[in-house]
Image (cartoon, rainbow, N blue to C red):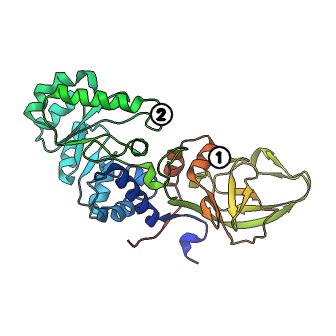
Amino acid sequence: MDADLRRAWVDIDLGALRQNARTMAARAGKPLLPMVKADAYGLGAVAVARALEPMDVWGFGIAAVREGEELRAAGIRRPILVFTPLLPSEFAEVRRLGLTPTLGDPAAIAAWVESGGGPWHLAIDTGMSRAGIPWREVGGIAGAVASSPPTGAFTHFHSAERNDGSMDVQQERFRGALEALGTPIPLLHAENSPGLERQSPSPWSFARPGVFLYGVGGDDGSAVQPQPVANLRARIVELRTLEDGDTVSYGATYRAHGQRRIATLAVGYADGYRRSLSNRGEVLVHGRRVPVAGMVTMDMTMVDVSTVSCHVGDVATLIGGDGDELIDVNTVARLAELSPYEILVGLRLRVPRRYTGGEG
């Protein structure tokens, strides 16, 4: 047995990842800039970028200079945009690595130009109030931008998954800001994953899908559905029979009603399987759903396998598919009362990754 598969691991289907990228590219009708920040949402930025680079993506999106350094060291040569505001002390490293900063603060723009300049993208805040120059204030930097124009400009949607008209409002604000700027900018971008689900084709230069690529999206009524990419699996490491009234895990929150069979899985919240799934989550064992029994602990999770024949060493699927059954990331997130993003990023913790579907 492979040492990485003795306990718990994540199977990542690169074929499904690429199919999701093809779906997004078809929606956009434009090139993609896949977001690979946070280690590609927990699934491995280098492996993801290598899988997507041959698809003629425009570039990649990250949040920190260190993430760009990792991609460059792995041989990724396409443009890499850093979407979190940078400190002037980071500019030299950004240039050394050939990264492109996104700037929205007038002082940061001036510091970038004064320190040597280079390609940069203007961040325009149209309602997120997180980073970038507010759309109302863009006219005030028109002169400064005219002397050292950005190579691109963008905004970010705050509620594209909602059918509330906010995406249209933000795009109109973006267009108005660009008009106030008065300087032609070659590259314009706005859509995230839910933005592409809602709008097709893109009116901009390229699109920035993120979570859809990794198998999350396709809300009710969506025109497209992603293929699942991440599968969290763990082995059964112990089995026991409980008598009526016996309890399981911390706080004794599970109490057996009649005789029950309990399997211990070698995975816990230190591996990204959240504690909030205690007594709420479901797991697949030999293609059948079984409930989490008791509190999820740091290193182990117990499930009630009274209805399934299984043995020590068998594999359980906590996220993903087994046979005809699927427990997708959205389902796990709903049961845990968390965002699907949090579930995926949590898989960066202790579990190793195994990549499949590496061809084509």
Q: Is residue 196 visible?
A: yes
Task: Please name the residue shown 38% across and 63% down the image.
Answer: 47
Tell me if residue 2 comes above or below residue 246 in the rendering: below
Q: Which amino acid does label 1 sit on?
A: Arg
Q: Is residue 37 left or right of residue 247?
A: left
Quadrant of image for the C terminus:
bottom left
Task: Please name the residue shown 42% across and 41% down the image.
Answer: 198
Tell me if residue 166 comes above or below residue 80 in the rendering: above
Q: What residue type is labelled 2?
A: Asn
Task: Please name the residue shown 38% across and 43% down the image.
Answer: 192
Quadrant of image for the N terminus:
bottom right
Q: Residue 14: x, y in percent? A: 44, 65
Label 2 belongs to which residue? Answer: 163
Find out whether the residues at labels 2 and 1 contact each other: C-beta distance under 8 Å.
no
Q: Is residue 222 left or right of residue 39?
A: right
Label 1 belongs to which residue? Answer: 275
| Mark 1 element type | helix
Q: Residue 90: x, y in percent? A: 24, 42
Q: In which quarter of the image is residue 125?
A: top left
Check disc 2: other Cα within 10 Å, few if <14, some if 14-19, many if 20+.
few
Q: Nearer the viewer, residue 279 or 173?
A: 173
Specify the farthest residue to the left: 147
